[in-house]
Image (tube, coloured by chain):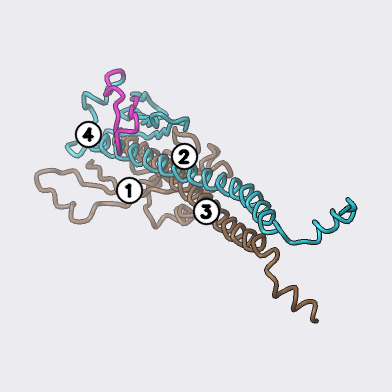
Amino acid sequence: MRSDPKEKITRILASEQGYSLIEILISVAIFAIGILGIAGLQIRATNADTHSRLFTEAYTVATDRIETIMLLPYSDATLVPGSELPPKNAGPGNRYNLSYTVVNNAGPTPPNNTKTITVRVQINQSILPAVTLTFTKAQVQDLTS
Amino acid sequence: MNNLKKTLKNEEGSVLFFTLLILVLMAAAGFTMIANSVLESNIVRNASSHTINFYAAESAAMEAAQKLDDEIDLAKLTTNNDDWLNPNGPSDPKLAVLTTAWDFDGSAPDNAEAGSTPNTAFTTMRVGVAKSASLGIENPDLLYEYTVLGRYYDSNNNPMAMIEAGFLKRY
């Protein structure tokens, strides 16, 4: 039996054998491309959420230290320029490196008897910038005065 | 019509259709997550700048309190010698604007003074003799009450944070 090659191709194309396989292959290919894009979105969103959490915690660590310093006596030994407490890890999981510097102000601006204190919180093992908060502690804040 | 029914009845291409449907649903979920993250980042940024502004405003108020505390020239504590000391308390007509407009550009008449931290300003008002503090028998001096105010301004000169504190001085 001699078969015409043209007729053969037409017959193969007309039959539906293997159609499902090709359909599924194409679907899987499209799905894979789509899901890769969505996975990228999810990773970015998770990263952004992590950064938000780290920043919130870093600011909380900094404010916590500021409020502690506010309660210290004005002439406390740890509030003397050059002899501040060394940087140390603090916060949840000791993930944050906390340090602060003290400058004794001389008047008139800022006035005498005030100290400008800068609290710096660096997030360990992170490329995120450090959080710095600056405030002025005045001698009048002393509860004992 | 018959053709359409036939097309709808057979299942050719249904896998592709459902694949695309799931993909669209997952994309919607992904975009919602991104939108939530952006919102979260904005909340954090807002909260952190509020913290910075708050301490800047408080620093300005503390400067004002310290200046009042350090002042030994009593005449300066009761007159409008300095731009930032408003001697007549809340009844001073100049103070009507204190809750809205502060003038601290250095050219008289000012009702506030720029703080040492950039974009901050402070002002004080002398309220008068502190309540229930005037009967000092052993001490001829009276206890005077002041209100100390500090503000932080943004780069467009809009007030962003304000601190109001009381201050007592005996003289």
Which chain does tag 2 point to? Answer: B
Q: Which residue sits at x=55%, y=38%?
A: B107
Q: Does residue B111 appear in this view?
A: no
Outermost residue on the top side: it is: A82
The lab-note entry on whether marks 3 and 1 share a chain reads yes
Which chain does tag 1 point to? Answer: B
Question: Is residue B44 covered in magenta?
Answer: no
* Residue type marked 2: Thr
Q: Which residue is mark 4?
A: A72
Q: Which residue is mark 1?
A: B165
Calculate the distance from the C-alpha at mark 3 to the C-alpha at mark 1.
Answer: 43 Å
Note whether B158 is above or below B5 in the view shown: above
Q: Are marks 1 and 4 in contact (CB under 8 Å)?
A: no
Q: Which residue is mark 2?
A: B120
What is the secondary structure assignment of the residue under circle 2? strand
Q: Colour of chain B?
A: brown
Chain shown cyan: that is A
Tell me which segment is drawn in magenta: A82-101
Which chain does tag 4 point to? Answer: A
